Every structure is written in C-alpha cells, then in structure tokens.
Amino acid sequence: MVVWIPLVLAAAQGINSGLAKDAAYRAQKRAQKRFDRQNLEFTNADLMAGHASLTMHRLQQRRQFADSLDQITRQSGQRIASASVSAASAGVKGNTVDAVLNDFKRIQLENQQNILDTEEYAQAQFVSESEALRSQAHARLISGQTGAIQRPNYMQEFLDFTQQTIAAFDYERQFNKKYPTEGLGAPKGNPHGPPGQLPPNMYPLY
C-alpha cells in the first residue's frame, strides 16, 4: 500500500499543476480573442475612414470634370454662334466660314477629350488607392495577430512527473536497503552511528 503513496502524490500534484496551467491557457485565449477583435475593429474603422475620404475626393473630381465639360461645350457653342452671326453680317459664306466653324468644333472635341482622359486616369488612381488601403488593412491584421497558444499536454506532464516520483522512490528504497538503520531491519550494533543517522559521507546530495 505504501508503494502507491508516491503515485497518489504525483497524481495530486499533476492535477493541481494541470488545473493551474489550464486556467492560464484559458486566460491567454480570452486575452488573445479580445486583442484580435479590437485589432479587427480598429482596422475596419481606419479602412472605412480612408475609403470615405477617397470617395469624397473622387466625387469632387467628377463634379469638376462635369463642370469643365459643360463649360467647354457652352463656350464652344457661343464661339460658333458668334462666328456664324459675324460671317452672316459680313456676307461671308462658303468654305471659309465652314473652316472656321470646324476649327472651333475641333478645339471643343480636343478639350473634351483631354478632360475625359484626365477623368479616366483619376478613376484608375482611385481604384489603385482603394486597393492599397485594403492591402494595408490586410497586412495590419496579419501582423497584429498573436501566435497560436499551445494547449498544455496534461497527460505527458503527469507521466513525466510520475516517472520522476517513481525514480526518486526507487532510489530511496535502494538506499535504505543498502544502508539500513535501527528500527528498519538493521542488524544489531549498527556501525553507521546512532539509529536513524546515516554515515557522514552517505547523505544524499539533494
């Protein structure tokens, strides 16, 4: 029956150690979840704010481009109308008037095309900056993630501790068998000193 005492002690200590490590593991998991959730919330908030700023700037650009197109169309129409009236008043007709009017129309189309090209470039830049914001947010989430917390191997720890306890118990039993003392089956006239006392050079080192 005495042989099982170290095993019982090992089991009790293993259970206590396991409970403490399990509590620490669960606390770390809860802290990790809170951190990851906050990191996700902050990252999404920054992403939405950045995208809102880009969108507002893009809307302003579109309004400016639309106003520029309207202005070009209006100015060109006024020039063509003025040139037509002036030509009619001067009695000028034919290819000369047509050339002047066509030149006004050509300038109008070129100016409109320049604005459309600028609008296309602005749209491409808006898409690129939006993708950059999402990439930055994704990188921030990855860099902010904590590593996986390893769950303690309770069974292995118990087995290791039990093995150490058995080894210590076996060492003590072999030592007592080799150097018995009074009251534990030692012969009469123990040469190792008073009962219960070990030789001076045989005290364990631990």
Image (cartoon, grey):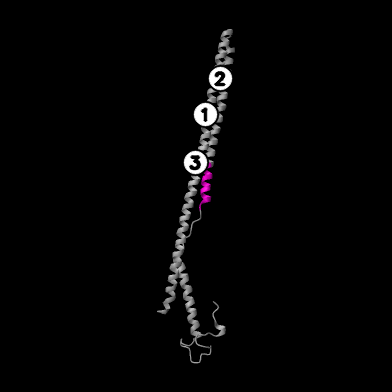
- From this view, report whether residue 92 is shown above or below residue 63: above
Dominant secondary-structure state across the stretch colored magenta: helix
- Judged by depth in the image, the label closer to the viewer, 3 or 2, is 3
**To which residue does mark 2 refer?**
75
Callout 1: SS:
helix
**To which residue does mark 3 refer?**
48
**How many residues crowd around disc 1 within 10 Å: few (fewer than 14), some, or many (20 or more)?**
few
Mark 3 to mark 2 CA distance (whole Å): 40 Å
Callout 3: SS:
helix
Q: As rendered, which of 59 and 135 lies closer to the eye? A: 59
Q: As rendered, which of 78 and 111 lies closer to the eye? A: 78
Residue 73 screen position, x and y as percent: 53, 21
- From this view, report whether residue 144 is shown above or below residue 191: above
Mark 3 to mark 1 CA distance (whole Å): 22 Å
- From this view, report whether residue 103 is shown above or below residue 28: above
Say which residue appears at 51% left-offset and 35% top-offset: 55
Which mark is drawn over residue 63?
Answer: 1
Q: Amino acid at mark 3?
A: Met
> Which portion, as a residue range, is magenta?
133-145
Q: Amino acid at mark 2?
A: Gln
Q: As rendered, which of 129 and 50 lies closer to the eye? A: 50
- From this view, report whether residue 93 is shown above or below residue 181: above
Mark 3 or mark 2: which comes first in sequence? 3
Give the farthest residue toward the front.
194
Quadrant where the N terminus sits is: bottom left
Mark 3 or mark 1: which comes first in sequence? 3
Say which residue appears at 56% left-offset and 27% top-offset: 115
